[in-house]
């Protein structure tokens, strides 16, 4: 036996292998294919070994459910149920030959220049020309015709059910011999050499039959049916189904005179059909799984997304018929034999780090990548594994192996990829109104007095109550303070720290306000800054979760942030029993109010109702009872000025 040779292709990039491997994801071809369920082009055995197999094309829809297949001279003939018709498929073209009044076409045999068709419910035997002309040969009292075969004498061998019989009938419809079986249905028959093997239903029994229709019991089973029979390497294989007992697994059995009977494979479901090939035998299940047995091991050949009803027999093309939905599939044609894996999703843009595979002899292996699925023209070309350093980072990858040379063993590949670090993303940034801040507890305010906090609805300071410590972030308004809130996320889930930089409009130099903000907002005392317009840059970094070489940064710029710490300027004059207050501010005047003789404040409107202007005039009448008058004005940033008059 040849020794399995192992190849390790390891690519070093960025940093050492130790650092790379600690952040690596591994994708195994075995797990990927079995989970995907569609190893199209190879058979995957339980030990991870791959061998070349049939590569199927996309299923083609047909009008009814196919329950029997016959091949002759490049043409496939299908018997359908649901619409009870006989169709032919030649060179990809589907053509209906004949329709029947019975429920279904359940058996077909091509004899020279005509087609023998068996129907069921009721059971009748027809002769049909290739042009579709029908001739009734025989009607049966049985409820079901299960098979029609050309016997060595030139007569027709017909199997029936309800009850189970075997008939030898001439091509003119004359019954020459009839054998009644104990079982209810003569379900399936297969010839190897000079012997016939018969499988029955209710109960499942396997017989050997000679040219005189003499039956010899081989074995009977506590199962419902022997659904199909075929041979490989001079051994008989048959399928056992227990349709009514869901606790029993369906089985595929092997029989030979020298080795007796042994179980090959079992699985939940129903085996609908068996088909031999030069290298082994295929088992089809009704749930779409196609398995392959090479004489030693069973492997998964294909998982179709529909129910398999029948497989073609003999040396014809591998024809697969489906019942749900009604359709069929044929092998693809290609000059070279390749296997292309399902698409591997690495979860993010990734670099291939190492590829490991086992093969005897060594195979030509290739890799390609792209950032879209399905595969399109944006994907890279196929790159040989020994040149994988030339492959750019991608999110999706596929691998391909060249099976054009004979192989004894191939165990797939394991691909190690390192997902490239992605920068943090700013999704929302907000500059809050002057004085609006988030506070979890009043003690966070530091050296500011509680009395400095005021309500949003009023421009002038009023005491606000402290919230409980565990009540979460609360919005307060604190004169002279500013806040920037932001929502920054990291697509890789890394820890983020944010840097806040300010750039004065009239200065060449900027400065860092904070370089380690770990929350989603930043509060600062704007009174420490000169008046003017600033540009703010936010930089989010994932350095806390990555090395210096791999760390990424995300940026966001606020182009305009105005700071105003200068209160309005008030000029008061006395004019004919009125106090005239002329107010000026560098930004805008938000509101003004007056108090007489220590009474409650009263908000007053400017002359001409020029609310929000940079210059406004207010007029207050001096009443005889007035002893003193206090006037206050506040701008849009909470800066307040006041002046007073005393009699």
Image (cartoon, helix red, strand yellow):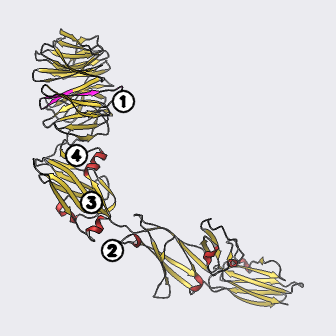
- Image coords of residue 571 (percent x, y): 73, 90
Is residue 277 among what the camera can see?
Answer: yes
| Residue in the foreground of this view, choosing between 190 and 94 | 190
User: Nearer the N terminus, badge 4 or badge 1?
Assistant: 4
At mark 4, the secondary structure is: loop
Q: Which residue is mark 4?
A: 47
Report the side of 334 relative to 268 (left or right).
Answer: left
Q: Is residue 235 magenta?
A: yes
As measured in the structure, the alpha-carbon distance from the residue carrying label 4 to the one carrying label 1 is 28 Å
- Above or below, 373 against 325 in this view is below
Report the side of 212 relative to 375 (left or right).
Answer: left
User: Nearer the N terminus, badge 3 or badge 2?
Assistant: 3
- Above or below, 73 against 8 in this view is above
As measured in the structure, the alpha-carbon distance from the residue carrying label 2 to the one carrying label 4 is 40 Å
Q: Residues within 10 Å of mark 4 (few under 14, many from 20)?
A: few
- Image coords of residue 495 (percent x, y): 43, 68
Magenta residues span 229-247
Q: Which residue is mark 2?
A: 549
Mark number displayed over residue 416 = 3
Is residue 132 among what the camera can see?
Answer: no
User: Nearer the N terminus, badge 1 or badge 3?
Assistant: 1
């Amino acid at each position: 036996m040849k020794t399995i040779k192992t190849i390790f292709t390891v690519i070093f990039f960025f940093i050492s292998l130790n650092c790379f491997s600690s952040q690596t994801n591994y994708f195994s071809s075995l797990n990927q294919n079995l989970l995907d369920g569609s190893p199209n082009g190879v058979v995957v055995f339980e030990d991870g070994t791959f061998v070349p197999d049939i590569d199927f094309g996309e299923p083609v829809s047909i009008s009814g459910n196919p329950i029997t297949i016959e091949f002759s001279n490049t043409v496939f003939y299908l018997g359908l149920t649901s619409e009870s018709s006989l169709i032919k498929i030649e060179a990809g073209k589907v053509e209906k030959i004949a329709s029947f009044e019975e429920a279904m076409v359940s058996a077909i045999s091509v004899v020279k220049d005509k087609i023998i068709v068996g129907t069921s419910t009721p059971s009748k035997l027809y002769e049909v020309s290739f042009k579709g002309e029908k001739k009734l040969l025989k009607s049966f009292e049985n409820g079901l015709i299960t098979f029609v075969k050309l016997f060595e004498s030139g007569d027709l061998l017909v199997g029936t059910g309800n009850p189970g019989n075997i008939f030898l009938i001439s091509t003119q419809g004359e019954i020459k011999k009839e054998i009644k079986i104990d079982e209810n249905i003569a379900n399936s028959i297969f010839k190897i050499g000079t012997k016939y093997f018969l499988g029955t239903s209710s109960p499942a029994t396997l017989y050997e039959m000679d040219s005189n229709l003499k039956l010899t019991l081989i074995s009977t089973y506590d199962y419902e049916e022997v659904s199909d029979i075929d041979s490989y390497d001079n051994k008989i294989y048959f399928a056992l189904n227990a349709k009514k007992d869901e606790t029993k697994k369906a089985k595929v059995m092997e029989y030979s005179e020298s080795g007796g009977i042994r179980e090959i494979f079992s699985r939940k479901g129903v085996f609908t059909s068996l088909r031999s090939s030069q290298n082994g035998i295929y088992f089809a299940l009704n749930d779409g799984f196609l398995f392959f047995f090479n004489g030693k091991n069973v492997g998964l050949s294909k998982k179709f997304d529909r129910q398999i009803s029948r497989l073609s027999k003999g040396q014809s093309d591998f024809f697969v018929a489906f019942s749900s939905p009604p359709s069929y599939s044929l092998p693809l044609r290609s000059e070279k034999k390749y296997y292309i894996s399902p698409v591997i999703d690495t979860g993010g843009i990734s670099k291939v780090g190492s590829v490991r595979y086992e093969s005897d002899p060594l195979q030509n292996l290739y890799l390609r990548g792209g950032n879209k699925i399905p595969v399109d023209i944006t994907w890279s070309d196929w790159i040989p594994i020994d040149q994988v350093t030339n492959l750019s980072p991608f999110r999706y990858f596929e691998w391909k192996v060249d099976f054009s040379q004979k192989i004894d063993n191939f165990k797939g590949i394991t691909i190690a990829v390192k997902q490239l670090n992605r920068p943090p993303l700013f999704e929302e940034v907000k500059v809050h109104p002057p004085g609006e801040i988030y506070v979890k507890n009043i003690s966070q305010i530091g050296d500011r007095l509680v009395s400095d906090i005021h309500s949003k609805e009023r421009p002038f300071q009023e005491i606000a109550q402290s919230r409980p410590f565990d009540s979460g972030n609360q919005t307060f308004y604190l004169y002279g303070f500013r806040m920037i809130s932001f929502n920054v996320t990291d697509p890789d889930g890394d820890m983020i720290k944010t840097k806040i930089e300010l750039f004065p409009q009239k200065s060449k130099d900027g400065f860092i306000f904070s370089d380690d903000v770990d929350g989603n907002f930043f509060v600062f005392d704007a009174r420490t800054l000169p008046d003017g317009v600033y540009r703010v840059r936010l930089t989010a970094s994932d350095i806390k979760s990555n090395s210096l070489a791999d760390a990424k940064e995300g940026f966001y710029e606020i182009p305009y942030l105005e700071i105003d710490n200068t209160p309005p300027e008030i000029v008061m004059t006395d004019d004919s029993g009125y106090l005239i207050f002329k107010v000026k501010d560098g930004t805008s005047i938000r509101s003004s109010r007056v108090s007489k003789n220590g009474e409650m404040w009263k908000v007053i409107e400017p002359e001409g109702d020029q609310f929000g202007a940079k210059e406004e005039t207010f007029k207050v009448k001096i009443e005889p009872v007035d002893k003193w008058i206090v006037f206050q004005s506040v701008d849009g940033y909470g800066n307040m000025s006041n002046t007073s008059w005393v009699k």
